[in-house]
Amino acid sequence: MEWTVLLKSILILFAIVNPIGSLPIFLELTNNITPKQRADAFRTAIITSLSILFVFAITGKEILTNFFQINMSDLLAAGGLLLLIIAIDHLVFGGLVKGVLSSRSQDAHHIGAVPIACPILAGPGAMMCVLVISTEHGFFIAAISIIVVFTFAWGMLRFIDKIYMILGKVVCMVISKILCLFIAAIGIHLLMQGLSVYFK
């Protein structure tokens, strides 16, 4: 196993999942429920996110290539464009986040599954990232990346109040913006990599 490839995959997935930058959103979504319900919501979110990404890592390529007749270059270009749009939206507009907050529910398990698990933690960007990692480097690398990132995310959700108290809203926002720049750069790279096939 190439440790540099694994580390790169973990960092890319972490930047896209962005659990630190999403701390204020998690607190806002669970503001009106009890601590026990919040714990239930976060547990549901982690389990649902893991399930979504593992299913996508295992079957995503087969579904896209065999059923939809999409090749790898198309996937790279689409994934890169999607990541670029997500990064620009978060950096400039924030429309996706506003939409998530406006559609929140008070049921703990519902909040955990939607919107915390999907689309915040395991959204389209994370799904595409896992699919690209699995296709380029194998399922084993993708699986370890998912487990490492969501173990970290679970720890953050477990101690979310203390972490947010220490970091504060401004620090979380700054980290989130930096990660978004990283996501935008990854998106451009994947987009150009996918388009390069058509300009040879």
Image: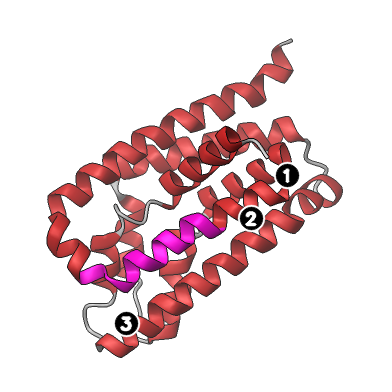
Foreground mark, 2 or 3, reads 2
Identify the residue under disc 2.
Answer: 143
Residue appearing at x 33%, y 69% in the figure = 157
- CA distance separating discs 2 and 3: 27 Å
Earlier in the chain: of badge 1 and badge 3, it is 3
Disc 2 to disc 3: CB gap under 8 Å: no
Q: Secondary structure at mark 1?
A: loop
Residue 5 position by quadrant:
top right
In primary-sequence order, the first of circles 1 and 2 is: 1
User: Rounded to the nearest whole Å, what is the CA distance between mark 1 and mark 3?
Assistant: 35 Å
Q: Which quadrant of the figure contains the C terminus?
A: top right
Q: Amino acid at mark 2?
A: Ala
Q: Residue at x 32, y 51 (%)?
A: 95
Q: Quadrant of residue 15?
A: top left
Relative to 46, is 137 on the left or the right?
right
Which residue is under mark 1? 138
Q: Is residue 18 above or below residue 40?
A: above
Q: Position of residue 196 (x, y in %)?
A: 67, 17
Q: Would residue 36 be found to the left or right of residue 43 on screen?
A: left
Q: Residue drawn at (43%, 37%), measured in percent from left and top?
A: 183
Magenta span of residues: 147-161
Residue 106 place in picture, x, y as percent: 33, 85
Identify the disc placed on residue 38. Answer: 3
